[in-house]
Every structure is written in structure tokens, then in C-alpha cells.
Image: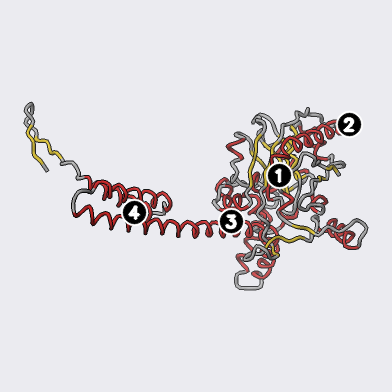
Amino acid sequence: MILKASKQTSECILLRPPLHPEASAMKTILAAYSGVLKGKTLCGWRTLIQATESRHTILGGTETHRMSKGTGSSILSALQDLSVAFLPCRSKMEKHLQVISVLQWVLSFLALGAACTLLLIYMFCTDCWLIAALYTAWLIVDWNTPKQGGRRSSWVRNWTVWTYFRDYFPIRLIKTHNLLPSRNYIFGYHPHGIFCFGAFCNFGTEATGFSKKFPGIKPSLATLAGNFRMPVLRDYLMSGGICPVNKNSIDYLLSRNGTGNAVVIVVGGAAESLQCAPGINSVTLKNRKGFVRLALQKGSDLVPVYSFGENDVYKQVIFEEGTCWRYLQRKLQKILGFAPCVFHGCGLFFGDSWGMVPYGKPISTIVGEPITVPKIEDPTDEMVDLYHTMYIKSLQCLFDKYKTRFGLKESDVLYIQ
């Protein structure tokens, strides 16, 4: 430290001597190493390597230079080897997290409701019966909440697990037109696929940035009403903004919940899921007119949505019409409300084996141009047919415009069944 007197005042100014170049270089190395320890792995290693090279350049002309040259080169070589060794491990860990995030959703959708129902019944037979009784009482009081807009949680919709879910396939959401917050919308989602991965990721979470791409619009993905009779599963679904696909629920969202609402309906439903397989571009839409009538009654604009790759994530055994297996599937579909598909993906540990994990195929969801719909409380069949035809043409144009960008041929067509 140097003490210097000012001529104009009687104050003393403490001046800090400039750092030696080597000290400055060492300070940079320590800062970079601190970054590595804090988890900034890639940037930390790069900065550390650059700082070591800088220190090697500063020193020169003496024995210290010769020692530093050997030491610096050894450190640089070691750090490069470490960075190469750590990066594949991190990439492998991220892949494992992606698989786990997808598998937890598949298992939750298939088994969480049934497992929690059995657990609740079992708890009534144990010393924990009071907890089960309190939850059952609350369930009865809360029974109509799914029909009244649900219980959306922005915290759940922004969970980090959904980014791993998105990156596994990966899933993309592509905007083609702006949507006005002063209007309500009905999104027609196609195709169904096996589990509607694209619909859930894009509209049930914020992993693809729906709220940023469509500010002022609140999506509500509609699914089977039976899922909301299952304990715990109902709350899990509602937290993502998912609602029952019935008239009461959709009516509430489109007429008693203000504007800026977008109800996402997978129009093909269970019947369409029986036809999905890799390479098949067909949708069940020809006789599905209920969503068009509903849009006219509520004055909500229709928006066609198509997901390229939705049918590619699972392989399914498709039975021919007229066979006993197809007959059994149709019967169970009417009883259960969903189609019991015979499908498989890849194994959890070996990619070439069969299992419940979907194949990592890209899913690109295109949100098309909205079709302005007038409000008619009692639309005629002719009016419904008119807007249904407009919707089909708009969906086909959307498919034709983007099909070559996502791996399809110019000759591929969308079949309407």
C-alpha cells in the first residue's frame, strides 16, 4: 500500500499497487475453477483452460517460464481430458432423466388413478382410516371442480421435468397466426396417437412456451371424464389445466370464464387411436361435427392443429375390421371409454427391445389459422355442415403446407375417415 498526500486537501489517499500479470492470471484461474465447482461445468472448464493458456503466455524469459511451460501444458492437457470425460457422462445423465420423465407420465396416466383408488380403500382397513375418510370427504366436496374450470397451477406447468419430457422426442410448437385474447377458441387436435404426447406437452405444460407464443390465451386440454373420478390423478391432471371432455366443462370455459380461453379437443378420440401407426396419415373427422356445433353455439373460433410425428412414437398391431380381435376392441371401447390398443415402444434399458418407453421421434405441432365463427344459439344442420367443411379444408391445407418440412413426401396425403 502507498500513502500519498493530496496538495489541495489534507486528505490521504491510499493507492493499491497494480496486480502483477501472473497474479491476475492466477486470479482468473481461481475464478474459473470456482465456476466448475458451482456446477457451470462446460463454461468453467473452457474458462479454466483459457486462463491457464493466458498465464503461460504472460510468463517468459526465465527459468520460471520453462517450469511454467511444462506445468501449464500438463494442466491444460489434463483439463482437456477431464472436459472430454465429463461431457459424455452429462449427456448420458440427461438422456436418463428424459426417459424417466416420459415414463412417469405414461405410468401415471395408466396406473396412478387405479393405484390410488386401491390405496384409499386399503387405508380404510388400517389405522390410517381417518386420513382416508378426510380425503374422501374433501373429494365429495370438490367433485364438481373439474367441470368449473379446474384448478390450474402455473408452478406445476413450469416443472423442470417437462423440459426433459419435451427434449426426449423432441416436441416443438409452431405458431402460424396470432390469436386475439378477446376471443375464445376451440382447438381441434389431430391425430390422437396412443397417448397424445404432443397435445399434453404443448397445452398441458409450458415446456414449449405456449403462453409466450400466444400471450393472453389460456389452453385447457380436454380428456376422458372418467380420469377425474380417480383420487390424486384428478388433481394431477387439473394442475396442468386439463379438463373433462364433456358439455358442462367446455360450456363453463367458453361462456362463463371470460375470454382468452382455448379448449383443446382431440377430435378423433379413441376410435382414431385404433388406427394410428408409424407412417399413417389419417384422421377420424368425417362424421365428427359436435365440436363445430358447440363452436357455433358459443361463438368460439375454430383452430385446426396437426402434429407431425404423433403416430410414430409407438408401433401398434392393427386388427382388420371384421375380426374377433377388432370386435373385442370396439366393445371394450364402448364400455371403458377408451380403446385398448395393442402397442409397444422400446425397452427401458435396451433400445432394441420392446417396452413401454416411446420411441424418440420428433413431434412438431402446427397451430393453424383460426376460422371465425359467428354465435348462433340454435345452428341448423346446414350451417354446421358448412363450417365443418371449412374446417376440413383448412386442416388439409395446413397438412399440405408443412408436410415436406417434417419428413413427408409431396405425394403424401391426409386421409379423412
> Which disc, if any, is residue 183?
none
Please state which of residues 146 and 233 is positioned toward the viewer in this rendering. 233
* Badge nearest the viewer, 4 or 2: 4
Identify the secondary structure beneath mark 4.
Answer: helix
Q: Residue 274 in the image: x percent, y percent?
A: 81, 54
* Badge nearest the viewer, 2 or 3: 3
Q: Residue 105 in the image: x percent, y percent?
A: 64, 57
Mark found first going from the N terminus, 2 or 1? 2
- The amino acid type, in three-letter code, at marker 1 is Gly
Q: Distance between the Cα atoms at labels 2 and 1?
A: 41 Å
Q: Distance between the Cα atoms at labels 4 and 3?
A: 29 Å
Q: Which residue is mark 2?
A: 380
Q: Which residue is mark 1?
A: 407
Is residue 211 at all visible to an observer of this figure? yes
Say whether marks 4 and 2 touch (CB < 8 Å): no
Mark found first going from the N terminus, 4 or 3? 4
Q: Residues within 10 Å of mark 1 (few under 14, many from 20)?
A: few
Q: Residue 182 in the image: x percent, y percent?
A: 66, 29
Number of numbered discs: 4
Q: Residue at x 67, y 37 (%)?
A: 261
State the quadrant of the C terminus.
Answer: top right
- The amino acid type, in three-letter code, at marker 3 is Gln
Identify the secondary structure beneath mark 2.
Answer: loop
Q: Which residue is mark 3?
A: 98
Q: Distance between the Cα atoms at labels 3 and 1?
A: 24 Å
> Which disc, if any, is residue 33?
4
Is residue 228 at all visible to an observer of this figure? no
